[in-house]
Amino acid sequence: MAWRKMRLRDSEVWARVDDEGNPIAAAGRVEIRYNAKVPKAYHAAVKNLEPIDGSKVMPDDHCAVVEDGAGPSKGGTRTTKAAALAKGGVDGPKIADGAIIVYADGACSGNPGPAGLGMVLIDGRSRLERSEYLGTGTNNIAELTAVLRALEAAPDDTRPLAIHTDSQYSIGVLSKGWKAKANTELVLAIRAKLAGRRNVTLHYVPGHSGVLLNERADELAREAVTSRSTIEKRYDR
């Protein structure tokens, strides 16, 4: 395998390619790196990658070997905080056995500006993805609404529910007693839903750190902002 510089929206990234410079996709997604020297891997939809004229195909060792939990790896691995967070083992409550797992994220262009949310829900072998356009709003509104959609998407209050977000603001105003100086009605509505059901835990994950489902939720949120549309799909894994 090799690497080639490509354009991903407003960024230039290194993408996994074959010897001819064509993206190597698995389930429609390609491994990418924002910085060749940083051992953090991400994934992008192949349709969102555009070759850059004149970019050279570079050998496999052009990009640093990734750490465990940061994406596909070559050779040995080592545990990172991001990997542990993805498993619920650091800086958060333990995830209950049999829990419904949700990754929720928000995006905004302009803050305020066009806003959207992304959500990935995993329930056994079932996977639900939602990309929802919210109209004009702030990033905090998008992040909070993503948590709300996670609660609405898992209506069975007898099941444990683990919601992952990279918004410390959302976790603070919803579970740490932070005073909400804005978005008070939305915060109160979500707090009421949280109080009305059992076994819901909020987990912080660092954004853009290689936690793949969080990266996917971020991608869905940004797609909603770009497309100005709402799409929901369910898959059997």
Image (spheres, rainbow, N blue to C red):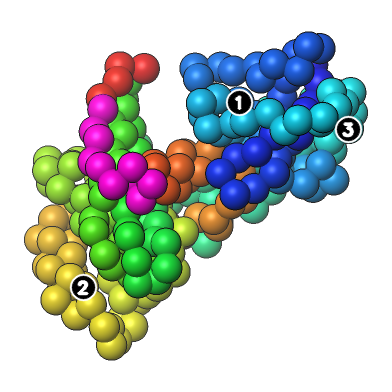
Q: Image height check: is 164 above or below 140?
A: above
Q: Image height check: is 171 above or below 125?
A: below
Secondary structure under tag 3 reads helix
Dot 1 or dot 3: first in sequence order is 1
Q: What's the residue at 42%, 68% (across, down)?
A: 110
Disc 3 target residue? 62
Q: Where is residue 95 in the image (x, y as percent from the top left)?
A: 39, 46
Mark 2 or mark 1, which is nearer to you? Answer: 1
Q: Quadrant of residue 154?
A: top left
Dot 2 or dot 1: first in sequence order is 1
Measure the C-alpha gap from mark 1 to mark 3.
Answer: 17 Å
Q: How crowded is mark 1: few (under 14 residues within 10 Å), some or many (20 or more)?
A: many
The answer to whether 182 appears left or right of 35 in the picture is left
Q: Is residue 77 visible?
A: no
Q: How crowded is mark 2: few (under 14 residues within 10 Å), some or many (20 or more)?
A: some
Q: Image height check: is 146 above or below 61?
A: below
Disc 2 target residue? 187
Which one is in front, 215 or 202? Answer: 215
Q: What's the residue at 69%, 16% (across, down)?
A: 22
The part of the chain drawn in magenta is 224-233
Disc 1 target residue? 30
Q: Where is residue 214 in the image (x, y as percent from the top left)?
A: 47, 45
Quadrant (top left, top right, bottom left, bottom right) of the C terminus: top left
Measure the C-alpha gap from mark 3 to mark 2.
Answer: 46 Å
Which one is in front, 9 or 141? Answer: 9
Q: In which quarter of the image is residue 8?
A: top right
Quadrant (top left, top right, bottom left, bottom right) of the N terminus: top right
Label for residue 133? Answer: none
Kindly identify the amino acid type of the residue bearing the numbered disc 1: Val
